[in-house]
Amino acid sequence: MLEKIREGSQGLTAKIILGLVILSFALAGIGSYLGQANDQPVAVVNGQKISQTTFARAYENERSRLEQQFGEYFTQIASDPAYMARVREGVIDRLVQQELQSQLANELGLRVSDAAIKEEIRTLPYFNIGGQFSNDRYLQVIRQMNFQPDTFRNYLREEMTRSQLVSAVAASDFALPSEVVATTQLQGQLRDLDYVLLTAEQVSQDITITDEEISDYYTINQSQFLSQEQVSLEYVELKADSIPVVKEVTEEEITALYNENKAQYLEPERRRVAHILVDSSEDEAAAQEKAEALLARIKAGEEFAELAQTESDDVVSAEVGGDLDWIDRDMMDPAFEDAAFSLVAKNDVSEVVQSEFGFHIIKLTDLQVEQVKTLDDVRAELVARLEKEHKTEHFYELQTRLAELAFEVADSLVEAAEAVEMPVQTTPLFSQLNAPAPINNPSVLQTAFSVELLEDKVNSEVIELGNEHVIVMRVKEHKPADTKSLAEVTEQIKAVLVKQKASELNAARGEELFAKLQAGSSLQDVAQELTLNVEQARDVKRNDYTLAPGMAKDVFQISHPSEGQPTLERITLVNGDVALVSLLAVKQAPTAELDPRAKENITVEQINRNYLVFVDALKQKAEVKAAATTVEAEQN
């Protein structure tokens, strides 16, 4: 088993998994994971705690991913407490999976060598400049994530070790041709059915919820109504881009910068050429003889482009009369390039030139001589560059002044703000999961909710948000985590209880009507009794979205109808609706030629199933204790 794991960990799958993990942490800011949290854990896995801080950041990452995925529709989706509760459960489940994988890797004695870690660091794109590893860039990035080199290596070692298990599961799976055929036929199966949909909403109109029921639900489920800890901040934000120009750019500076960077404003000589290629890979002498003959025909007056179309072995350029577009120095074979750049005037044709590809006849079709942009041509660019340098220089002067006064006058930001000529801004109350910009930064949030700012009531240190972008803040108001009052959540509880009762009543109604169907009543009779319509669905696919959400999946679990006798079934949907279904026919997909993509997709599905089995097996053997979180999907 260990050998398979080691082999799997060297493959592409492992690289992809590790790359995605590193990317998600790099974008979100890993530093927030390193805080020493004193809060209650969201789960305990074989005695190892998963902190609220770790959960909060993972939850925020998932929320950001969903916002990117759903765009403007996310606000509507996030307003559903049940949906966001499932998101929170999914985040906790993934954190538990990661912890179980780490523990198993340690039990198996899996290790990643220092050499492997060093190589991985050198290949990660976040540490590269111009395609080459940069140690300065490496140190800059990990420090922004609040890592030291040794702690980052330890973190990376843990992620790489854990990825060995995941990649081993993926690398050991395959699908047989017979499995692909059977699965393809099942996936392409179609079904015909009639159905009546009983919605929970139809029975919810007459449901009454008493104050006592609301109070009882509140008492039993108080953990659901925990409000997050919140703060309101005062802050001073300083950005180089937003400070005024305090030093005029002089003509001497412009001239000096132009002279220092004159090489940047040189536009080298360029030539546009066409060619005729005679391939010499089989018979060099014959190829040269053919090229010489073609050159003679060109000199005799035949059109170069027409000969290129009919005679050139470069089939791509031949279609456009041999045109190779513009070329610069050091782009082509040296012999070809020397001949092309020795041509003097447009329409000049070279002698026969030999390169590693064969024999060429080259024609100069256009010419751009070397040019140098004048100072006036680039003046605006130089002025903007110098203004930015002046702003940056002034920014660091202001940053130093801001840091000094924020420390010296620790109980107010007024003097520090006046010194840098920036306003003191304020935020409304917010939690760690709905912080406004520019507060929604891991380092800023960690500081905003720190003991020092909450209890000592002092100004923070200067916190870097980006290049030439810093912030200093203090807590204006603090609202500890607490249980929301009954009055605040009464309507929320009422909606939950109405939905629960409606689902129960609808389920009972569905059971009663299904018994009538089994006793011999027709689907049409049941529909008329309720003044509903019998819906017809034909050629339903497994991923059909014309049916109620989730219904297609259950339809494909109904047993096949017998000859002339439909199969009756009652389907309860996740939203409390009930479908009374009469399955009329099952149509098998025709046997088709094996599609390589289908095999790949089926193998991936099999990998996913086996991975879930693998994770479930770990959970079955583990002691996992989940605790209620204090994270809410939205502020009510």
Image (cartoon, helix red, strand yellow):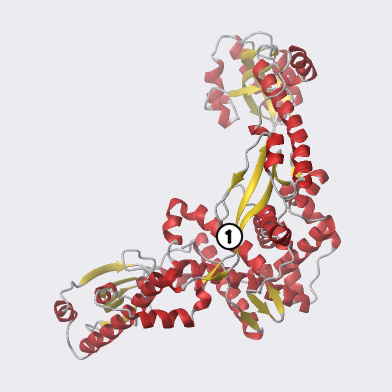
The image quarter in which residue 29 lies: bottom right
Give the image location of residue 409, x and y in percent: 75, 46
Residue at 43% x, 60% y: name it: 77
Task: Please say if 239 is above or below 530.
Answer: above
Residue at 82% x, 44% y: name it: 136
Query: Residue type at mark 1?
Result: Ser
Give the image location of residue 169, x and y in percent: 65, 72
Instruction: Judge left or right: residue 190 versus residue 22.
Output: left
Q: Nearer the viewer, residue 313 or 131?
A: 131
Which secondary structure, mark 1? Answer: loop
Residue at 61% x, 47% y: name it: 438
Q: Quadrant of the N terminus?
A: bottom right
Task: Please say if 451 is above or below 288.
Answer: below
- Residue ID for mark 1: 431
Give the image location of residue 28, x and y in percent: 65, 54
Give the image location of residue 69, x and y in percent: 50, 54
